[in-house]
Image (cartoon, rainbow, N blue to C red):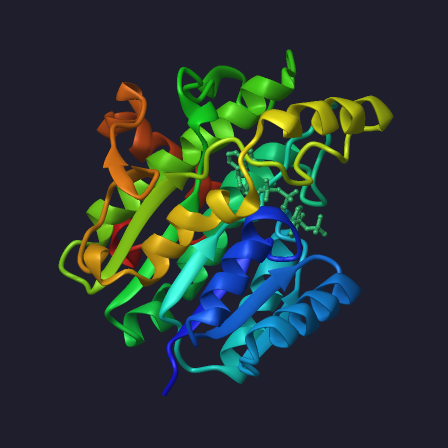
Amino acid sequence: MKELCMITGATSGIGKQTALEIAKRGYQTVIVGRNSEKCQLTVKEIIDITHNYALDFFVADLSSQQDIRKLVNDFKERYDHLDILVNNAGGFFLQRELSIDGIEMTFALNHLGYFLLTLLLIDVLKESEPSRIINVSSNSHMGKPINFEDIWGEKRYNSWNAYGQSKFANVLFTYELDRRLKGTGITVNALTPGFVATNIGRNNGFLSKIIMNIASLFANSVEDGAQTSVYLATSPEVKGVSGKYFVDKKAAPSDRATYDLETARRLWDLSVEITGVNYPLEKA
Ligand SMILES: NC(=O)c1ccc[n+]([C@@H]2O[C@H](COP(=O)([O-])OP(=O)(O)OC[C@H]3O[C@@H](n4cnc5c(N)ncnc54)[C@H](OP(=O)(O)O)[C@@H]3O)[C@@H](O)[C@H]2O)c1
């Protein structure tokens, strides 16, 4: 049986390149996107390049809890194993937006999307041990601790803080999940892809597109940006390695405050409260 890898946000940028590289290596590759047409085109493009026909896709808005639950149900109907999960879908929102569940969009998509999808897939990842979870965070998490007093920017919204804290949450989630997965054959790591020329931020109007076009002149390519995700997903060098933050395929320190157990537990409990899922169940 081919090893199966699911990559979210694989219709563009770093996720698409990650899916291509993983398909090239012969894995059964399942992409998740929010747009069916884009998913179909991406699958076709990857098959044309790799001649790996073990490609499939699911459509879900990962800021919607209902969509994530449906995605997981549909996935489990079609597949009985999952060896690698790459949580990659993310966004940057200049203006404060709310998800369909009434949650600030950056937090809903960038953090709760990872949290809920991962916890709903834990059983199938467990059945596929050894298995791997990879969380795409960002260097932008540095110096952006979670503001629990105004976590959804209700009093004051700042897009950079919202983005930074969501990426901080990715690291906290990785470390806390690692502690909870001890004794299992599932590993979980986070990474920064570096500054990469992608579509991120281009959803914020005409000016943002111009700024992103200029910024992309100084950015790394998607090939570079996907390297660490692909490494963590496939390399034998990181077999059994868990609970680390990676930069350029090397474990590196994350922001000091991400190692705080109480903060991680606080974010975990809040995420459980919002989504109604927990791991392990007895710690609810
Ligand atoms: N680019 C950078 O410099 C950089 C730096 C550090 C970290 N990152 C992280 O890298 C990850 C990938 O970002 P990227 O730069 O490759 O951006 P991107 O080109 O905009 O790709 C984002 C992907 O996520 C999907 N997506 C967005 N909102 C979604 C939703 N509500 N439901 C489902 N899928 C959704 C997008 O779908 P569509 O194709 O339909 O838009 C796309 O496939 C993100 O987690 C980001 O925070 C990026």
Depth check: give the residue in front, 11 or 275.
Answer: 11
Depth check: give the residue in front, 49 or 278.
Answer: 49
Query: Is residue 96 among what the camera can see?
Result: no
Which residue is pictured at 73% across the width and 70% down the height? Answer: 40
Give the left or right position of residue 256, taking residue 213 as reference.
left
Depth check: give the residue in front, 166 or 272.
Answer: 166
Give the left or right position of residue 142, taking residue 189 as reference.
right
Which residue is pictured at 25% across the width and 56% down the height? Answer: 187
- Answer with the quarter of the image where residue 53 lies: bottom right
Q: Quadrant of the N terminus?
A: bottom left
Tell me if residue 237 comes above or below residue 203 in the rendering. below
- Residue 98: percent from left, percent from top: 71, 34
Which residue is pictured at 56% across the width and 27% down the height? Answer: 163
Farthest top residue?
A: 156
- Split into quadrants, the picture shows ligand 1 in the one at top right
Farthest left residue?
A: 183
Tell me if residue 33 comes above or below residue 254 in the rendering. below
- Answer with the quarter of the image where residue 282 lies: bottom left
- Residue 191: percent from left, percent from top: 38, 40
Tell me if residue 101 comes above or below residue 148 in the rendering. below
- Residue 63: percent from left, percent from top: 63, 47
